[in-house]
Image (cartoon, rainbow, N blue to C red):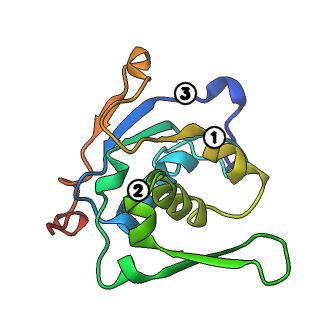
Amino acid sequence: MKTYTATPAEIEKKWILIDAEGVVLGRLASIIAMRLRGKHKATFTPHMDMGDNVIVINADKVQLTGKKRMKPNYWHTGYPGGIKSRTTGQILEGKYPERVVMQAVKRMLPGNKLSRHVMTNLRVYAGTEHPHEAQSPETLDVVSMNSKNTRTA
């Protein structure tokens, strides 16, 4: 039996719309990462960009469990003594709340060239508006997949 390998001509990409309102961040990120890689398809090939284009709306209304809102996120400016931090809650309430979802998805993908290319297929928006209506995306209801995917308050 031969191993199936998809060719670029055989790859079909769809557009998926996900509403992140009330959804737990980690569970959302794992579903998005799986869709971006293309692991949900029977023709999955590890070295090809098989995944769909994913649009996430309401990224500022994503939920965190436990005390993760107080967890510090560190970065370094490159200068001596230039370590800085901001909590996840501060980022969600700040100017770019979509970066929390982007970072969670990025960390669930392998750290190679392909995953950096796959991340270009992800579009995250803080509000309900997005400029991709012309692609007629299919809605993926993450809340109804599992009762643990959602959390209130």
> Where does the image place residue 31, in percent across and percent down from the top left?
41, 56
Front label number (1 vs 3): 1
Q: Is residue 84 above or below residue 92?
A: below
Measured Cα–Cα span from mark 1 to mark 3: 17 Å
Q: Secondary structure at mark 2?
A: helix
Q: Residue 31, which numbered label?
A: 2
Front residue (pair 38, 31) = 31
Front label number (2 vs 1): 1
The residue drawn where x is 44% and y is 60% is 29
Residue highlighted by disc 1: 120
Identity, as a three-letter code, of the amino acid under mark 3? Glu
Q: Is residue 9 above or below residue 18?
A: above
Report crowding for label 3: few under 14, some 14 to 19, many 20 or more residues within 10 A (C-alpha): few
Residue highlighted by disc 3: 12
Measured Cα–Cα span from mark 2 to mark 1: 16 Å
Q: Secondary structure at mark 3?
A: loop
